[in-house]
Amino acid sequence: MASLNQCLASLARLSLVAPARPTVTPTLLKFLVPSATAPLVRRASGGGGMRKRPAKKKKTYKMFRSYDLSQIEQYSLCDAMRYLRAIEVGRPPASVKYDLAIKIKTHKNGPVLRNSIRLPFPVKTDTRIGVICPEDSPLMVEAQQLGAVAVGQESLFESIREGNIPFNKLICHVDSQEALKQANLGKILGPKGLMPNPKTKTITNDLKATVQELIGADEYRERGGVVRIAVGQLGFTPKMLSENIRALMSLVKTDISNADENHPKALDEVVLSSTNGPGFSLNGTFHSTDEKVKPEDLQSVM
Amino acid sequence: MVGVIRRMNKLNAQLVRIRNGPGAAVLPQDVTRIHMEFAHKFNNGHMGPRKFWQDALPRLKYWNPAVPMVVNRTHDQEGPATLTLYFREPGATLKSDVPQPGSSTDGFAKAPTPAEGERAVTIDMKNRRSEAILKEFMDKSGAVPVKPTAQDELLMREVEEREVQSRIDYERIRKLNEEAKREKAMLAQAQSEAAAIRGES
């Protein structure tokens, strides 16, 4: 009897449970759940007409996307400079910059690379330097190569008097000190804090040291998996640019190797571009592939 | 950064046009430097010089990287538009450190007076088209045009084909987008009308 009772109990349980579930369930299940006996067939119509499928879940990536670089054309520094100098011809050499973009294989979250560097040849950021020195002298050429935006003596005084002041730092070479005194520019330059003065070390006989002192260190920071920083001015020689790039790359590489173990980083690609020019992926070599073009050819006045 | 192939296509199209085209020419050895002066805006006959600077000068600079090419742009539209070619006198050797100002946008880089052993030839560019300026430039400088290599010709054809295809694709997508936009606007209008009717009743 006991067994019958058990049977009844189980039957009762069944009858109690069954109404709670929707009666269509078994039939629905037949269609929805792929049974082991029915072969799984995909039809173009989706089987159920206009049945809505759940929205496809967008795949999320933990790393920034990096590309297969096997098809990329990479350039030597001199080749890239030759093209960029051609594209930037006739632009003021102090205001056009070479920019470097360093792509890094890295996680989207986690710490970013961040550091500051004093480049061997500083790139002016927002310091625009004017240099007073005798006209048509080698000093004038030196000042321009150092990145001065306005160089000269009488011509510069004249433009200052006209209110045309393209610089925000003004230095004067000792040779032009007397001329500066006679020019009576104190009224114009004094209130702006631009008047050269031995006290502020802006009257100098070593233009290079003074200019480098006026230009501070450059900061860089990884954004979106890329470190972007200006590494040179258009007027730089290939050698100057390569030294700047080398200094920057060695620092970035140490930064990468010091990265947190949970968020490892690796160098992916280095791209050189200029203010108005396209980006050239660098292959790390220096000399041009065209034997006729020597590095010395790429340092003429722009 | 953008994908590799897309980047390469764009870059190659730009570079092949620097290597070839009007102005791609090798200057003779005795051309020491080139100086241009013209105004910032194109009125009063400064369009040709601007076009010459933008189209021909990059190609010249690519093929003659060692020749200084300085552009002096002024704000004086009434001013002259001249191109100065500097030649080394036969047999003369020039000092390597002749002071030379870099390009300027404020008229600071005036054409330097020819150094010792140098002679200057000027071309008046005002009120002339860039093609005419280039023709006179080629005659006076004795530059030899560069013939495109077989590889570059192939590349140029590819670039042109891509551009034709891109215009077709652009047109197709534009039509699709416009259609989608129109449908959306119609739907929005119908819905607002329906809401207005419901509001009235």
Image (spheres, coloured by chain):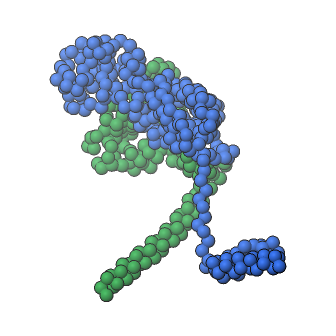
Chain colours: A blue, B green
Query: Can I make out residue A279 in this image?
Result: no
Q: Does A299 sit left or right of B100 as displayed?
A: right
Q: Residue at x 67, y 46 (%)?
A: A68
Q: Which of the 4 image quarters holds residue A131?
A: top left
Of residues A48 and B118, the one nearer the viewer is A48
Q: Residue at x 40, y 31 (%)?
A: A125
Percent across and percent down for residue A232 are 48, 30
Percent across and percent down for residue B43 are 30, 49
Q: Is residue B51 above or below residue A145?
A: below
Q: Does B112 sit left or right of A177 as displayed?
A: right
Percent across and percent down for residue B166 are 55, 61
Q: Residue at x 55, y 43 (%)?
A: A109
Percent across and percent down for residue A265 are 61, 36
Q: Is residue A176 above or below residue B134?
A: above
Can you say which quadrant of the picture contains the C terminus of chain A?
Answer: top left
Q: Residue furthest bottom?
A: B201
Q: Residue furthest front?
A: A1
Q: Is residue B123 above or below residue A52?
A: above
Q: Residue at x 41, y 17 (%)?
A: A208
Q: Is residue A205 above or below residue A40?
A: above
Q: Does B32 sit left or right of B111 as displayed?
A: right
Query: Can I make out residue A80 in this image?
Result: yes
Can you say which quadrant of the picture contains the N terminus of chain A?
Answer: bottom right
Q: How many marks?
A: 0
Q: Does B7 sit left or right of A41 as displayed?
A: left
